[in-house]
Image (tube, rainbow, N blue to C red):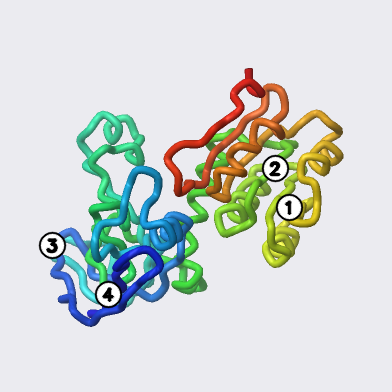
Amino acid sequence: MKVAYLKEAMKIVVKDDAKIPEISDDQVLVKMEYCGVCGSDVHFYKDGRVGDVAAPPDFVLGHEVAGEVVKIGAAVKNLKVGDKVALEPGYACGKCEYCKTGRYNLCPNVIFFADPPVQGALKEYVAHPADMCFKLPENMSTEEGALVEPLAVGLHATALGGVGLGSDVLILGGGCIGLVTLLSAKARGASRIVVVDLYEKRLNMAKEMGATEVINAQKENVAERVEELFDGKGVDFVFETAGAIATIQQTPYYVKKGGTIVLVGMAAESMANYNFHRLW
């Protein structure tokens, strides 16, 4: 099968050199159809690392995936050949403190696509646990299915922050994660949702998807616009979804007293200067 290897920063090579993986009794073989490009993939591609984690040689990126089941293990009952599925990219041990307390996302033994040393899913076929493959509705394409994983990030972010009816929300970054955070905040009853980005295309999409206001950081003074829009009081919830040091550093200047900051994006750098005095 074909596999896309990250040979070094800014260089991906596609080779037809890998065997289609064998599956165990509790796994399915999925033919990949769509794979999203996450911010972490971009950092690995552009910088060769995310924070303290460097990409190993011949690293395979990709974890936002969906495809078609082409083979099932002997013990699999919930799926059949031909099913369209979205894949949860990580699966946990099920035995540690975090798994036992229902926080399996924090499992130290999690196996997660494109989290070194685990290879990602930019390949033609993937063997994956059946209970981490979720059948898509008949009216949903695998292209849409590949967006289920980033949507889950937005849902988790707004749940973690506690967005509710009447909340004011500021989202720094209008890429995929910013937009799904916007959708989630809207679904949770936020009254005003403002999205900040550098690119008009993204801001137009944010307005189309329900943002009450947008701010173009290339053309406008963001701090002045935030003060104007929120009457100088700050914002209930500030979400950083760009994964950049600059926007992480801006968050304490925009949040309301008693408000909440949620850092969603992952920067390429490990360390960031941060004005904690603003919070104190």
- Image x and y of residue 278, in percent: 66, 23
Query: Dot 1 surroundings within 10 Å: few (below 14), some, or many (20 or more)?
Result: some
Badge 4 or badge 3: first in the primary sequence: 4
The quadrant the C terminus occupies is top right
C-alpha span from label 1 to label 2: 13 Å
Q: Nearer the viewer, mark 1 or mark 4?
A: 1
Label 4: element kind:
strand
Q: Which residue is mark 4?
A: 3
Badge 1 or badge 4: first in the primary sequence: 4
- Image x and y of residue 269, in percent: 45, 44
148 relative position to 173: left or right: left
Q: Residue at x 57, y 50 (%)?
A: 242
Label 3: element kind:
loop
Q: Nearer the viewer, mark 1 or mark 2?
A: 1
C-alpha span from label 3 to label 2: 45 Å
Label 2: element kind:
strand
174 relative position to 109: left or right: right
Badge 3 or badge 1: first in the primary sequence: 3
C-alpha span from label 1 to label 4: 38 Å
Q: Nearer the viewer, residue 261 or 29?
A: 261
Q: Residue 7 falls in which quadrant of the image?
A: bottom left
Q: Residue at x 15, y 66 (%)?
A: 23
Q: Which residue is mark 2?
A: 170
C-alpha span from label 2 to label 4: 39 Å
